[in-house]
Amino acid sequence: MAKKKDLDRDKLSWYLRLITLGDRFSYQDFFDRFKKGFVEFLIVFFGVLVSFSVEQQGENFGDRESNIDNLKGLRDELVDMHEYTLEYIAQNEWVTGMYQRQYDKWEQDSDSVFIDWEPDQEFYFAPMGYYTNRDAFNPPRVVYDAIKLDGTFRFLGSDIGRLINDNYDGTDLKYLIMNTDKEEKGFIDDFSDRLGHQWVFDLKDIDVESDQFWIENRKYIQSDKFIKYNLFKRIQLWIQIREQLGDYDVNILENIKVLNKVISEKETEIVVVWWWFSRPSWLQASQKSEPEELQDPEPSVDQ
């Protein structure tokens, strides 16, 4: 009888022998152990899951704070771009006006036809002596280049991100840079080639920085229709650039308003530890009714 019991025990499957004590196996005991082990597993599993989730949320919160700071930096850089564009517009209008006066009086019978007067600095000068000068449009973009790959624009959303990107890499800016750089260089190169391939053979000394040069050779220069036409076409380019600058600046101002709105919404979110929630509409309405001096003012932008 004992041999038969030993034989039956040997026939028990390996997994039963693993989790039981041989002939003392009990289904109730087995399920009790299983439930206990399963509950302990769930506790450990969800504990680890919650731990990772909290850690990830903490990283997301840190990214959120960093992204808000980046948005403020980007907004401030757009303000700098606006101011730079206004200065460039003023420069463009001054240069265009100066050379337009020169073109209008090109045919006058006067030895000082190529001499102008600068009232602010109180000195005479020859505008054509500075004709080879140019200043390519190059607005600031340090902040944009630093953050464009760090996730800030995903934080903004694709639509707003595209609007901001247009100020830095859009078609309008590319045409502005091309017109103020490559196109201007073409007119300057033609002017310099004319001096180097013709004037140098016809005139005794070439010193375009000297006012006396333009006075002594004014009849010869007046007869050079190529130079006059070159000036005419360059003035037309400057007028076109002025229109482009105006459109570009309008776009900058619109995007400054967009960023101010986004920053304001992010800063008014309700933050609980590492979680944040949009402020309820009724609470936003109550905030708007607060006295104006209690609200954070938006940065001033010259219109």
Image (cartoon, helix red, strand yellow):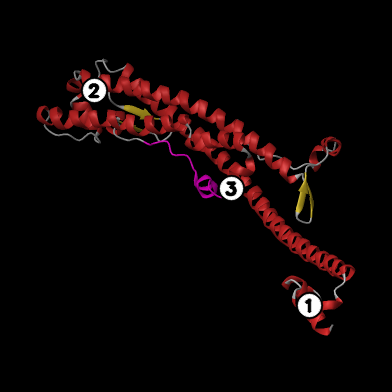
Q: Callout 1, which amino acid?
A: Arg
- Does any portion of residue 138 appear in the rendered image? yes
| Residue 117 lies in quadrant | top left
In the rendered image, the vertical position of residue 270 relative to residue 19, given as above or below? above
Q: Is residue 205 left or right of residue 103?
A: left
In the rendered image, the vertical position of residue 202 relative to residue 286, given as above or below? above
Question: Which residue reaches farthest bottom?
Answer: 2
Q: Is residue 181 left or right of residue 224?
A: right
Could you tell which of marks 3 and 2 lies nearer the N-terminus?
A: 3
Q: Callout 2, which amino acid?
A: Ile
| Residue found at x 68% / y 39% | 262
In the image, 270 versus 9, the foreground residue is 9
Q: Callout 3, which amino acid?
A: Gly
Q: Is residue 292 left or right of residue 259?
A: right
Question: Is residue 136 in the magenta section?
Answer: yes
Residue 186, x across and y down, in percent: 28, 30
| Residue found at x 55% / y 48% | 147
Q: Start and end of the magenta stretch?
A: 135-151
In the structure shown, which secondary structural element does the residue marked by tag 3 occupy? Answer: loop
Q: Residues within 10 Å of mark 2 (few under 14, many from 20)?
A: some
According to the picture, the residue beneath numbered tag 3 turns out to be 151
Dot label at residue 78: none
According to the picture, the residue beneath numbered tag 1 turns out to be 9
Could you tell which of marks 1 and 2 lies nearer the N-terminus?
A: 1
| Residue 24 lies in quadrant | bottom right
| Residue 47 lies in quadrant | bottom right
